[in-house]
Amino acid sequence: MTSVLAPYLLPDGFGRPALAALLREGSVVTEAGRLAVQKGSARRTRRRTPYAARGVIRAAEPVLLVPGFLAGDWTLLEMAAGLRQRGFRTYRSHIRANVSCTLKAAALVESQLERIADRRGSRVQIVGHSLGGMIARGIAVRRPDLVSGIVTMGSPMLAPAAHHRLLTGSVTVLNRLSAVGLAGFMSAECVSGPCAETSFHEVREPLPEGVAMTNIYSRRDGIVDWKACIDPQGVAIQVRASHIGMALDPRVVLVVGDALARHTAGVATLSAVESA
């Protein structure tokens, strides 16, 4: 299947993961098992804890979670649950399936941010998985009045096309569905026309002052080139997880929560951190 992705989406220095890399995504089974164990332990601890002592201190800033390509809010339910246990007030993006034009998805997320900011009287932090992180990065450039910080997970911001060829095939299928008149699917313009160019350049613009960013990546990522996930303006944190597993591995949830807390505390610079 021929790709219609614009060449500039894959700059020199970045590549597509090989088939062998995709096999590493099988570790999502282990990551799901780790989640099940953690949830069981949390339930037992909660039952042993007196009701009056179960409360947590609410974080000042709300958190919006944005799913990746082909995914919906349901893929970040466990991430949201883990963050709520730490006192973060989480919100959904209302993206059922991230398969439409990126700019349209960004407009939907931006509208949700406006509602949350108005309701809570504060700026919002965004946690974005894969494409969701790229959407968050672009919105942060345009709307620093709404966004105080972003955490990206496996988001190839420096090279959006640095992903496995199977994913490129999915993009081509969506383009063809759009071409025959089916609404709600990503068109060729979104990956090779003005829409793609706008998104690509926006995500590479300097972040406004006062907007913090943490980039979580994994060298075990079998879907995207991990090097494309490290933005020079962000704090890079390596985790040991699959691309899909980043959304549910309790260890990654812990790293995300720590990053959000640092953003709130105003810690803007850290050296690259290795997570167990």
Image: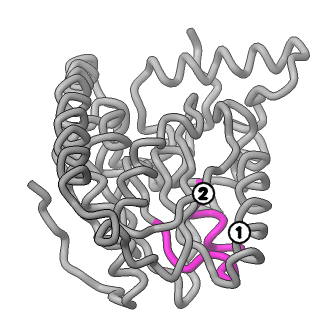
Measured from the top left, where is residue 20 in percent x and y? 20, 19
Q: Can the viewer see residue 56?
A: yes
Helix, strand or loop status at disc 2: strand
Q: Report which quarter residue 189 is drawn in.
A: top right
Q: Which mark is residue 105?
A: none
In depth, the one of 49 and 147 nearer the eye is 49
Label 1–label 2 contact, CB within 8 A: yes
- Point out the tag, 1 or 2, that comes first from the N-terminus: 2
Residue drawn at the location 39% of the way across and 72% of the way down: 260
Q: Which residue is mark 2?
A: 91
Q: CA distance from mark 1 to mark 2?
A: 8 Å
Q: Which residue is situated farthest in the left direction here?
A: 276
Asked if residue 4 lies left or right of residue 100, the reply is left
Q: Which mark is residue 116?
A: 1
* In the image, residue 192 lies in the stretch drawn in magenta: no
Measured from the top left, where is residue 206 in percent x and y? 55, 77
In depth, the one of 96 and 160 nearer the eye is 96
| Rendered view: 4 above or below 219 | above
User: Which segment did they paint magenta?
Assistant: 135-150
Q: Quadrant of the N terminus?
A: top right
Q: Can the viewer see residue 232?
A: no
In depth, the one of 260 and 228 nearer the eye is 260
Residue drawn at the location 33% of the way across and 48% of the way down: 13
